[in-house]
Amino acid sequence: MALAIALLLSGVLLPCWGEFALFKKGSTKANGARCSHHSECFSDCCLINLDSGGAFCAPRARITMTCLPQTRRAINIVCPCRVGLKCIQKDPDCSRRCRLI
């Protein structure tokens, strides 16, 4: 009986486990939500939308994606890299990209 309950709970809770990660930090806004400062977003990236003039929470840049270092500004033009990656410029003619450290 206890095993059946444990299996039932694991089947219900495990698929939703990633949703609890939103509450790890003080910010609760998921990607796509409107924002006015990068600290409001779970990803710590509030990206400006040049078409609408607003800003929205966006995921951090992945490996080889264009990036900018995190600034103290409220809104980003390009998101900083994910954890474990560093935003570097290997060639003076190319933009900065996320690379493995």
Image (spheres, rainbow, N blue to C red):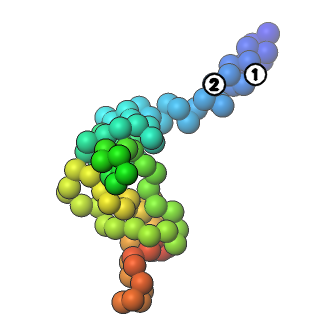
Q: Toward which corner of the image does residue 27 lie, by quadrant?
A: top left
* Residue sitting farthest toward the left: 72
Q: In the rendering, at what x and y percent does residue 59 appear?
A: 46, 51
Earlier residue among tags 2 and 1: 1
Question: Circle 1 — which element?
Answer: helix
Q: Is residue 55 above or below residue 17?
A: below
Q: In the rendering, which numbered label is found on residue 7?
A: 1
Label 2, label 1: how far apart the Cα atoms are: 10 Å
Q: Quadrant of the N terminus?
A: top right
Q: Nearer the viewer, residue 38 or 49?
A: 49
Residue beneath the point at 41% across and 32% down: 23
**Residue type pointed to by label 1:** Leu
Q: Is residue 65 left or right of residue 36?
A: right
Label 2, residues with CA under 10 Å away: few <14, some 14-19, many ≥20: few
Q: Is residue 71 above or below residue 52?
A: below
Residue beneath the point at 72% across and 25% down: 11
Q: In the rendering, which numbered label is found on residue 13?
A: 2
Q: Is residue 63 left or right of residue 47?
A: right
Numbered marks: total: 2
